[in-house]
Image (cartoon, coloured by chain):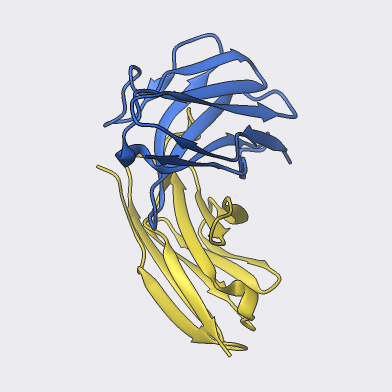
Chain colours: A blue, B yellow
């Protein structure tokens, strides 16, 4: 199994500012995934963070709004830029286990934009 | 397109059995996952199916029919602590392992 440390666990931010969320994994993984979970809803994939190349974004998400870094095989960051109240969500990072039969999640970052 | 459907809410009684269904239509298929998520917490892994049939793990079982694009999660001997959201997710692409999640089913267990 993989242990994922995600921080901050929660934050309250002013609109127009940016927040960077960090995700640290206790083992090397090829791909890391960033999800958003809006209140009362399921998880939506934002992007796949690839080491050594640009992140791959899903429809509806763009790099300018959600820049992602992946400097090595155990770490990634997601920045939520120029925040508005609509960005208030839980953001989760995830990795797939070595057997590709299980995905592990960080504890999540609960973001509130005021 | 990608489409994964689950009932929005279900209720059941402590000690009973409940079946949560999931139907999917995805451009690819590399396995189906079930996750449990308590309010305010991250999802936790319950099961993975890639071949047709039933996988049993304690009180929880998961079934898959790839030809029908259908899965269910069966919870036996329900306990109050089973009150949670249950998320069905499909790994739609072999190369990326990214998961596409269904809408989630909120299960409430009553005494």
Task: Answer left or right for B11 relative to B84.
Answer: left
In percent of width and height, residue B67 lies at 37, 57
A61 in relation to B23, above or below: above
In which quarter of the view is residue B71 placed?
A: bottom left
B103 in relation to B20, above or below: above
B86 in relation to B48, above or below: below
Say which residue appears at 60% left-offset and 34% top-offset.
A8
In percent of width and height, residue B108 lies at 49, 77
Q: Quadrant of the C terminus of chain A?
A: top left
In percent of width and height, residue B92 lies at 41, 40
Task: Answer left or right for B83 relative to B22.
Answer: right
Q: Can residue B99 be seen?
A: no
Task: Answer left or right for A89 relative to A106.
Answer: left
Of residues B54 and A109, the one nearer the viewer is A109
Q: Quadrant of the N terminus of chain A?
A: top right
Say which residue appears at 35% left-offset and 18% top-offset.
A63
Of residues B48 and A21, the one nearer the viewer is A21
Say which residue appears at 60% left-offset and 40% top-offset.
A9
In percent of width and height, residue A2 lies at 72, 37
Return the residue found at the far top. A52
Q: Can residue A39 be seen?
A: yes
Say which residue appears at 70% left-offset and 23% top-offset.
A28
Q: Count how many numbered circles sit on residues in the image.
A: 0
Of residues B91 and A112, the one nearer the viewer is A112
Task: Answer left or right for A39 relative to A77.
Answer: left
């Amino acid at each position: 199994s993989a242990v994922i440390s995600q921080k901050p666990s929660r934050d309250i931010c002013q609109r127009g500012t940016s927040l960077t969320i960090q995700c640290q994994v206790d083992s090397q993984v090829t791909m890391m995934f960033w999800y958003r979970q809006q209140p009362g809803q399921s998880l939506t994939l934002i992007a796949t963070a690839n080491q050594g190349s640009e992140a791959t974004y899903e429809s509806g998400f763009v790099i300018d709004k959600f820049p992602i870094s992946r400097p090595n095989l155990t770490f990634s960051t997601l920045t939520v830029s120029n925040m508005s109240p609509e960005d208030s969500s839980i953001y989760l990072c995830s990795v797939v286990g070595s057997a590709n039969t299980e995905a592990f999640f960080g504890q999540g970052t609960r973001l509130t934009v005021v | 397109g990608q489409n994964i459907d689950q009932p929005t809410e279900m209720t059941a009684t402590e000690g009973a059995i409940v079946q949560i269904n999931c139907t999917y239509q995805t451009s690819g298929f590399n396995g189906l996952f079930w996750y449990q998520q308590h309010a305010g917490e991250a999802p936790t892994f319950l099961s993975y199916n890639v071949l047709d049939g039933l996988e049993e793990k304690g009180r929880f079982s998961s079934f898959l029919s790839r030809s029908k694009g259908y899965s269910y999660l069966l919870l036996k001997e329900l306990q109050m602590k089973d009150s949670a959201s249950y998320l069905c997710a499909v790994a739609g692409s072999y190369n990326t392992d990214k998961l596409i999640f269904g809408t989630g089913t909120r299960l409430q267990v009553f005494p």
